[in-house]
Amino acid sequence: MRLWSIHPRYLDAKGLVACWRESLLAQKVLLGETKGYKKHPQLVRFREQADPMQAIGIYLEYVYIEAKARGYNFDHSKIIKVEPGEQLMVTTGQLEYEWAHLRAKLRQRDPNRLKKLKTLVAKDIIPHPLFKVIDGPVEEWEIVN
């Protein structure tokens, strides 16, 4: 499961579809509707919120918006709760880690997309709109490979 902190605009087609599916899975986990993934580290930042369903709903909403802009037909009715709320924090180190992680995936999956993004450097990467960037290292919950 990967709930990207970077903006969904950077994801390739497979990455965007996977993000949608994994975010929907995260929503089910937060609702207590799964047997697995209950302790997945990617969910820590959502569980820490006063309203985890609101946070994952906003996350999903922006993935949906990106998919719609690309002409994909994701089912918006699968998002349980979409209400405005406060932004979550994400560190500069986390964004840099994810940017490197995405580039590695694109090298294998979509080299043409990687070429288009080649001029971007980590400090210029826009976060997913749910997140506000603060200085700091890779998040403690991240499993660094």
Image (tube, rainbow, N blue to C red):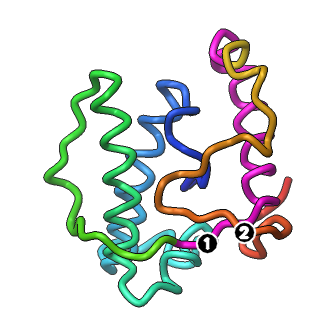
Task: Please report the residue visible at 51 percent of the width from the left and 34 percent of the height from the top.
Answer: 9
Magenta segment includes 120: no
Checking the image for residue 89, the label placed there is 1
Which kind of residue does numbered mark 1 sit on? Answer: Met
Secondary element at image label 1 = strand
Compared with residue 1, is residue 31 higher up or lower down, i.e. above or below?
below
Judging depth in this view, the residue of 78 and 49 nearest the camera is: 49
Residue 113 found in image quarter: top right
Left or right: 93 in relation to 8:
right
Residue at the extreme top: 112
Left or right: 20 in relation to 101:
left
Residue 122 location (% of width, % of height): 79, 42
Secondary element at image label 2 = strand
Residue 124 found in image quarter: top right
Compared with residue 1, is residue 46 higher up or lower down, i.e. above or below?
below
Residue 98 location (% of width, % of height): 72, 48
Judging depth in this view, the residue of 80 and 129 nearest the camera is: 129
Magenta range is: 88-113
Q: Which residue is identified by label 2?
A: 134
Assess disc 1: are there few (<14), some (14-19) or many (≥20) residues with their C-alpha within 10 Å of its C-alpha. Answer: some
- Whichever of labels 2 and 1 marks the residue nearer the N terminus, that label is 1
Task: Please report the residue visible at 85 percent of the width from the left and 67 percent of the height from the top.
Answer: 137
**Marks 2 and 1 in Cβ contact (< 8 Å):** yes
Task: Please report the residue visible at 76 percent of the width from the left and 70 percent of the height from the top.
Answer: 139
Task: Please report the residue visible at 65 percent of the width from the left and 20 percent of the height from the top.
Answer: 109
Assess disc 2: are there few (<14), some (14-19) or many (≥20) residues with their C-alpha within 10 Å of its C-alpha. Answer: few
